[in-house]
Image (cartoon, grey):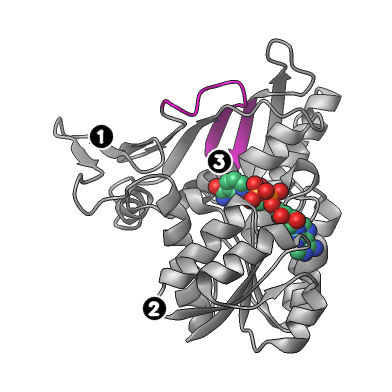
């Protein structure tokens, strides 16, 4: 039984707590937030102690693993401090995305986990769907052939105006992680950005990429779209066929190169994913399973860092009008 806690109890931390509580191989033993009004109702709901200070939680509870669901600037500015304190205390950590909005901090977090010999995962939940798993199997079975191109799009409605790079750093860890999941490491980036009407931040992006394999990729992103219609499309073209995952988990289509028959798998109406919220369940269940068996983790700290390295290269490319190498 993995003994877990959740730090940061906004809407997302409460979602983590819910899925830990429902996982039969995990026991939610404590919750922590700086704000009593955030943590107390959750503690009451699950019958576990509430902490307002992370050091007290670490000193008082026997815990194996902790979700860090804080937010902060660019939705990741508050992740570093609690994560590093937990890693230093020998706890495995699942941190929300972005791993950090600061690339320096993100690198340190990954390094610290390595030094301490503990597991660090990132909640890159978009790849934890049956559609993505089936597409991965097509790839592993050779049906796709060699990956030639990846076309990714992720559009949602987020009117928040924070930093110029908020859209890139906070949203696109997800899309870039899915691209890397199928295409492997990304080495070169060229970005064009655009501000939507009335916006002060770069809320639209068109980014060209090259993978280490030589395959090419493209990402379209927006914070000026609707969350009420499909938000994501992932197309991967290979030498033997091409697949499209529509709207995260709703449909997988595979088009073999040499046959007119295509494979279509819709999310089943019974027993399928009930909504986007279930991506959190799938991700957390995998984190519990892989942490319990000593790792390694899917969507690891390294993966979270790699996505942020691509984003930082995109920012450099846009500022310099250049094609940028991805660090790391
Ligand atoms: N994976 C996804 O699909 C997805 C979707 C939306 C948001 N998110 C991510 O989830 C995270 C949380 O989002 P949210 O909307 O719940 O944020 P939020 O601001 O509502 O909640 C964060 C909470 O963390 C607490 N906190 C901050 N620093 C703390 C510390 N040191 N110790 C204890 N508590 C602390 C705050 O008091 C607050 O209650 C963000 O990083 C965001 O990017 C992920």
Q: Eyeballing the image, is 207 above or below 285?
A: above
Q: Which of marks 2 and 1 is in front?
A: 2
Say whether disc 2 or disc 1 marks the residue closer to the N-terminus.
Answer: 2
Cβ–Cβ under 8 Å for marks 2 and 3: no
Q: Mark 1 — residue?
A: 257
x, y percent for residue 303: 62, 57
Q: Establish whether ligand 1 lies closer than 8 Å to the Cβ of label 2.
A: no
Which quadrant of the structure image shows residue 225?
top right
State the separation of the CA atoms marked 2 and 3. 30 Å
Does the magenta-highlighted stretch encompass residue 211? yes
**Of all residues shown, which one is farthest toward the top?**
197
Q: In this view, does 144 lie to the left or right of 214?
A: left
Q: In this view, does 275 lie to the left or right of 310?
A: left
**Of all residues shown, which one is farthest toward the left?**
261
Query: Which mark, by number, is residue 24?
Result: 2
Cβ–Cβ under 8 Å for marks 3 and 1: no
Does the magenta-highlighted stretch encompass residue 323? no
Q: Mark 3 — residue?
A: 175
Say whether disc 3 or disc 1 marks the residue closer to the N-terminus.
Answer: 3
x, y percent for residue 40: 65, 66
Q: Which residue shows up at 75% across the image and 76% down it?
A: 87
Q: Residues within 10 Å of mark 1 (few under 14, many from 20)?
A: some
Q: Establish whether ligand 1 lies closer than 8 Å to the Cβ of label 3.
A: no
Q: How crowded is mark 3: few (under 14 residues within 10 Å), some or many (20 or more)?
A: many
Q: Nearer the viewer, mark 3 or mark 1?
A: 3
Depth check, front residue: 284 or 127: 284
Helix, strand or loop at label 3? It is: helix
Helix, strand or loop at label 2? It is: loop
State the separation of the CA atoms marked 3 and 1. 26 Å
Q: Eyeballing the image, is 301 above or below 244?
A: below
Magenta-drawn segment: 206-229
Depth check, front residue: 36 or 34: 36
């Amino acid at each position: 039984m993995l003994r877990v806690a959740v730090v940061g109890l906004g809407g997302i931390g409460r979602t983590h707590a819910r899925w830990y509580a429902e996982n039969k191989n995990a026991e939610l033993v404590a919750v922590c937030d700086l704000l009593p009004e955030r943590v107390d109702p959750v503690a009451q709901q699950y019958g576990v102690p509430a902490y307002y200070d992370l050091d007290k939680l670490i000193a008082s509870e026997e815990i194996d693993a902790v979700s860090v669901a804080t937010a902060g600037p660019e939705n990741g500015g508050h992740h570093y401090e609690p994560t590093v304190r937990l890693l230093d205390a020998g706890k495995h950590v699942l941190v929300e995305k972005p791993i950090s909005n600061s690339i320096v901090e993100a690198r340190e977090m990954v390094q610290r986990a390595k030094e301490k010999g503990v597991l660090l995962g990132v909640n890159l939940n978009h790849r934890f769907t049956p559609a993505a798993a089936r597409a991965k199997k097509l790839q592993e079975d050779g049906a796709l052939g060699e990956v030639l191109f990846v076309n990714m799009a992720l559009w949602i409605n987020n009117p928040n105006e924070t930093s110029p790079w908020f859209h890139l750093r906070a949203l696109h860890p997800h899309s870039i992680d899915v691209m890397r999941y199928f295409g492997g490491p990304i080495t070169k980036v060229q970005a064009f950005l655009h501000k939507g009407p009335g916006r002060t931040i770069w809320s639209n992006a068109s980014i060209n990429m090259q993978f280490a394999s030589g395959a090419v990729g493209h990402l379209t992103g927006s914070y000026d779209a609707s969350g009420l219609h499909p938000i994501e499309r992932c197309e991967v073209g290979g030498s033997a066929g091409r697949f499209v995952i529509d709207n995260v988990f709703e449909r997988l289509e595979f088009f073999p190169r040499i046959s007119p028959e295509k494979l279509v798998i819709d999310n089943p109406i019974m027993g399928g994913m009930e909504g986007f919220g279930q991506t959190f369940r799938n991700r957390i269940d995998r984190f519990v399973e892989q942490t319990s068996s000593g790792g390694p983790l899917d969507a690891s700290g390294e993966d979270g860092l790699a996505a942020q390295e691509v984003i930082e290269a995109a920012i450099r490319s846009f500022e310099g009008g250049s094609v940028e190498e991805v660090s790391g």
